[in-house]
Amino acid sequence: MTADLIADLLDGQHRALARVITKIENREPGYRDLVSQLHEHTGEADVIGITGSPGAGKSTLVDKMAATYRDQGLTVGVIAIDPSSPFTGGAVLGDRIRMASNVGDMDVFFRSMSARGSLGGLSTATTDAVKALDAFGKDKVIIETVGAGQNEIDIVKMADTVAVLVPPGSGDDVQMLKAGILEIADLFVVNKADLEGADRTVQELKEMIEYRDGGVPGRVGHHGASASGGGFERADADGGEESEQWIPPIVETVAKDTEGIDDVLDALADHREHLVESGELDSKEQMRYAEEIRTLLREDMSVLLEREIDRMGGLDEYVERVRERETDPYSVSDEILEPLVDCLERADE
Amino acid sequence: MGVDQEQRTIRCLVAKVGLDGHDRGAHVISRAFRDAGFEVIYSGLHKSPEEIVQAAVQEDVDVLGISILSGAHDTLVPKIVDGLEEYGAFEDTLLLVGGIIPDDDEAELKELGVAEVFGPGASMDEMIAFVRENVPERR
């Protein structure tokens, strides 16, 4: 059964790909075998993360990017992640509505995923889904997600290249500085660049990038928001001793009119080239797999612990003792882990 | 072992096909399904049968609910059924139709493989219960 499904997926059947992703999402029995078998077929796709606040235009941009890649003869997989209700687990996944440019084109494989409320589980499911798309043979895999919270930042970290969408007028300089999401950007896209305030946003981003490198913005006037020419900033234009370092370019787009999409793709390609030349691609991969293994270990470990806790008859008794001030949560944790610690210490000897 | 606890969630595609632009019903149902704990993918308005098939296959939905108020169900629904069959997705997708469907047509749609037709006045609870009971077993 598993072998058939894998064979069908590798054979290019979209239905099999869809089913594999479902199994991954549902964590159906045997999904681990599936993903294990997929692994050897992965490593070819170029993984791109797109993030930005709700309404920034992520889905529209992804749609146009996918269409442009298709024009170049490349195949595309998209995973769009939307939040789910923490109360019912239900979700309305709306990103698909924007995928208007790729109607009837199965070679753009678009899949909506919800956060399903499980802490950490989402990044595992997304990693595995990316593997499925990669093994299927998609040239470009795009992960689209609202950049809210640690969980989502983890997801975007799985990408080789991360583009952060910033809509015009997203607050003053302080907002820009405090948002941790900006630090993960390899590329900034100021979408809706036809709206008022786009120039100012570009200018603020420029300042932020220059401050980030510990420098003082040289070209910036006293009032910040002088109009910039717009278009595509070459990142490595300055050259010099820091030419090794990637400076995130800023691209202006009007995604709904397909304006600036080529610039985005060029910038993504430049970053890819930088990754390969600087050897960062390899180190990123090493880090990613290390992180993946750690995440899996954490999850597997917590499952083991849950099972052990069930076996001991649940936590109720401990909770009662904690309430009575007979013990405290730290001591309980030590107590429960004691056999494990003993076991590991014995293994060391 | 390990991370094997199953987290099965019912996935639904709520689809508006053809030129009919009345989506209040589709919105209400999307919301009710969401509140019932389903994952709902809403297609948006004015979709072609091919788009619906593409979405249903890629999203691997358990339930496809088609909302048609234009009277074009007898041309649009068969196209969707054919498309699903082409990708081997027809067997394990629960097909529902909602809208203004004459009784004779309802029989025809059911003949085609539509599991149930919900007309005006159908209650949300009824629909959600129907989905829960009839959602196909997946292998």
Image (cartoon, coloured by chain):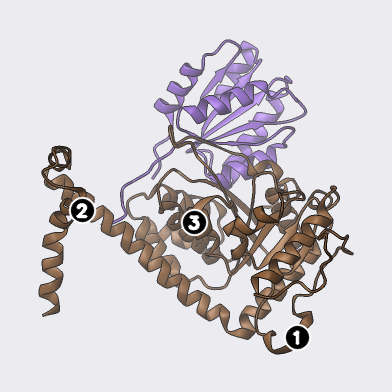
Q: According to the colouring, which chain is purple?
A: B
- The amino acid marked with disc number 1 is Gly
Split into 4 quadrants, where in the image is the C terminus of chain B? top left
Q: According to the colouring, which chain is brown?
A: A
- Report the side of A249 relative to A144 (left or right): right
Residue on which the image places disc 1:
A239
The quadrant in which residue A305 appears is bottom left
Mark 1 vs 2, N-terminal side: 1
- The amino acid marked with disc number 2 is Tyr
For disc 2, the chain is A
Foreground: disc 2 or disc 3: 2
- Callout 2: 10 Å neighbours few (<14), some, many (20+)? few
Expressed as whole percent of the image width and height from the top left, the position of residue A315 reads 17, 42
Expressed as whole percent of the image width and height from the top left, the position of residue A306 reads 22, 49
Mark 1 to mark 2: distance in Å? 53 Å
Expressed as whole percent of the image width and height from the top left, the position of residue A14 reads 56, 54
Q: Nearer the viewer, residue A341 or B62?
A: A341
**Up-down relation of residue A225 to residue A146 (above or below):** below
For disc 3, the chain is A
Both on one chain, marks 3 and 1? yes
The quadrant in which residue A219 appears is bottom right
- Callout 1: 10 Å neighbours few (<14), some, many (20+)? few
Residue on which the image places disc 2:
A330
Residue located 53% across and 64% down the image: A157
- Callout 3: 10 Å neighbours few (<14), some, many (20+)? many
Foreground: disc 1 or disc 2: 2
Residue on which the image places disc 3:
A126
Mark 3 vs 1, N-terminal side: 3
Foreground: disc 3 or disc 1: 1
Residue B112 visible within the image: no
